[in-house]
Image (cartoon, rainbow, N blue to C red):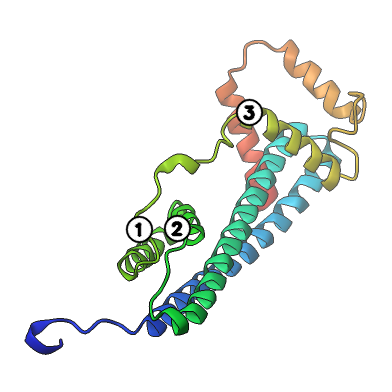
Amino acid sequence: MGLFGKTKEKDPKEMVKEWRSALRKEQRGMDRQIRSIQNEENKVKRSLRESAKKGDKDVCRILAKELVQSRKAVSKLYASKAQMNSVMMNMQTQLSTLRMTGSLQKSTDVMRSMNSLMRIPDIQETMRELSQEMMKAGIMEEMLEDTFESVEEEGLDEEADVEVEKILFEVTNGILGKASETPSALPEAEEGAAAAAAVGGESSEEEEEEMQRRLEALRS
């Protein structure tokens, strides 16, 4: 507390230093997440190859979808790290201008990046706190409206199917996937599919349970 009960304002240099430190800490956490996801991805790839050898196309597609999701998650983490780098670079520029102007300057780029980073659940609380501090320091006037929401949901199913086909082709070395236009790549699997189609009494719920059991067996 300062004189007359007023809280002493933080030194702008110290604030920038703290912000950069907080962002670097979050980046290290993201690096750990990326390594963890990639380790799991390697396990899924092994399971997918085993299923491909057995001709189990249903399980292969489920596993391929898991790989699509994990790769998208990693891509988002890298994008978030890049946005943090952008903010940190701006903070370095702020320190340079601080010596000349005596105060921190408003930055639309920082505002955009922080608004985007606040949408990430794992770091949302930290980013909100940093944003509030930056607003008080004059770097950000106000939070942007949600006009930059991603439109990736549009056409997501079709795009996901394309990615699944690519991953199937990549991981199974061409046994399955988009490049295999003819349906004769796995004779055993095709025969199994024809037999399953001939049996009309089985419910989709039972099929899902069976696939789940096969997935658990592969991972055990």
**Gap in angstroms between the C-alphas marked 2 and 1:** 8 Å
Q: Quadrant of the N terminus?
A: bottom left
Look at the numbered disc 2 and give the secondary structure of its residue.
helix
Toward which corner of the image does residue 122 lie, by quadrant? bottom left
Three-letter amino acid code at disc 1? Glu
**Gap in angstroms between the C-alphas marked 3 and 2:** 29 Å
Depth check: give the residue in front, 138 or 187: 138
Rendered image: mark on residue 111: 2
Which tag is nearer the camera, tag 3 or tag 2?
2
Report the side of 6 relative to 107 (left or right).
Answer: left
- Residue 28 in the image: x percent, y percent? 56, 73
Three-letter amino acid code at disc 2? Met
Which tag is nearer the camera, tag 1 or tag 3?
1
The reply to whether dot 2 and dot 1 touch (C-beta < 8 Å) is yes
How many other residues sit within 10 Å of disc 3, few (<14), some (14-19) or many (≥20)? Answer: few
Rendered image: mark on residue 141: 1
- Residue 205 in the image: x percent, y percent? 55, 24
Q: Residue at x 80, y 23 (%)?
A: 192
Earlier-in-chain disc, 2 versus 1 = 2
Earlier-in-chain disc, 1 versus 3 = 1
Rendered image: mark on residue 3: none
Q: Residue at x 33, y 71 (%)?
A: 137
Q: Residue at x 56, y 61 (%)?
A: 83
Report the side of 204 relative to 95 (left or right).
Answer: right
Report the side of 98 relative to 197 (left or right).
Answer: left
Which tag is nearer the camera, tag 2 or tag 1?
1
- Residue 58 in the image: x percent, y percent? 72, 32
- Residue 178 in the image: x percent, y percent? 85, 32
Look at the numbered disc 1 and give the secondary structure of its residue.
loop
Q: Residue furthest front?
A: 100
Three-letter amino acid code at disc 3? Gly
Which residue is under mark 3? 155
